[in-house]
Image (cartoon, grey):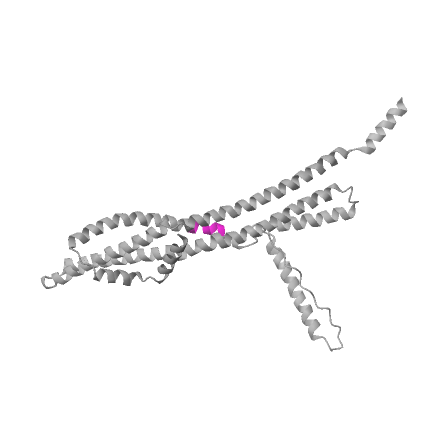
Amino acid sequence: MATGWKQLQTGFATLNLGQSANKFARGFNSSVQATKERLGQVSAEYRDLETRVDALRQTHFTLLKITRVYESETYDYPTAIQESLTELGTTIGQGITNFAAANLKGTNLPAPEPATPGVAQHKTLPHALGRAATTAANAMQESSPASEDKLGKGLAHYAASWEKIADARVQQDETIKVHFLQPWQTTLSTSIAVAMKARQAVRVSRLELDAAKQTLKNAGPAKQEAARIEVENAEDDLVQKTEVAITLMKTVLENPEPLKNLNELAKAQLIFYATAAEALSTAQGEIEELSVAAEGEYSPYPSRAGSLATTEISLT
């Protein structure tokens, strides 16, 4: 099915709808009555398919408008702009330093050491949370004995979970771009676009038929026969172009690819959220144990309790 659809898409891209219909129309040989009956039949089917294709086209536009955020890594991290500006300033500074280091060699002026560019960081919320929690955990563990710092340990568990989630987030976005965004955009710009082009050919043919009928209405006796033949030819052309459009619209509507792509979108999101849930569940369990232990060891007013005990003994 998929191979057949790709072949149809290739054919769509090279199809000249106007020429195909006109050639077919010139070879069309049937009575005027048969043409009118066929035109009535295809017109009803055409209108139904037209409505369905419009809905399919709008569906592609609507979902692509939202899901295109997956093409930009920073969609859930608003402070990325500030970080990018900071990195730009750093990059410019490094460029100036490296330029000076290269151009001051061999002169009497001191040349600075070349600056090494920093490693590029992902700008997503999961990556930012993981980095922040790691920094905080290190700070807490450096300031306290490792065996006593429960908050530092909790932050380390939290950071580890977000590192896993960050990796899953990158994988999710890449999968969505390749298996949903790209094929949906391709369907919109190829098969659906060709069906819309076929419909435009039908509209032009219908206008030509209306013009031919108007010419017949206004024609004098000497031109009646020629004008009548033009109307018949225009009717034949409209029937053939309508049938071409019907075939293309049916093919578009029967195409299984959009549903297959939607499944890939949902699957990628499911994997991401399942990974996030598992990672956070593990971290939360570890943090809860540390929290319970810390609460059991906690005495809010040790100095006051000792003072009250001393007072009670002296009174006795």
Query: Hey, which residue is sitting farthest left in the picture?
Result: 221
Question: Residue placed at 64% from the left, 62% from the top?
Answer: 89
For this view, does 5 lie left or right of residue 19?
A: right
x and y, in percent, of residue 211 in the image: 21, 59
Asked whether 120 or 21 is in front, the reply is 21
Q: Is residue 183 left or right of residue 41?
A: right
Report the residue at 31% width, 57% height from top: 198
Residues drawn in magenta: 60-67
* Residue plotted at (54% across, 50% down): 172
Residue 64 part of the magenta-drawn span: yes
Tell me where residue 230 sits by quadrant.
bottom left
Question: Which quarter of the picture shows residue 297?
Answer: top right
- Quadrant for the C terminus, please: top right
The question of residue 66 being in magenta is answered with yes
Q: Is residue 79 above or below residue 150?
A: below
Q: Judge by depth and name the residue closer to the eye, 249 or 143.
A: 249
Residue 245 in the image: above or below residue 271: below
Tell me if I can see residue 210 in this picture. no
Query: Where is residue 152 shown, x and y percent of the image?
Result: 73, 44
The prevailing secondary structure element of the residues shown in magenta is helix
Q: Nearer the viewer, residue 41 or 129?
A: 41
> Which residue is at 70% across, 37% downward?
289
Q: Quadrant of residue 157?
A: top right
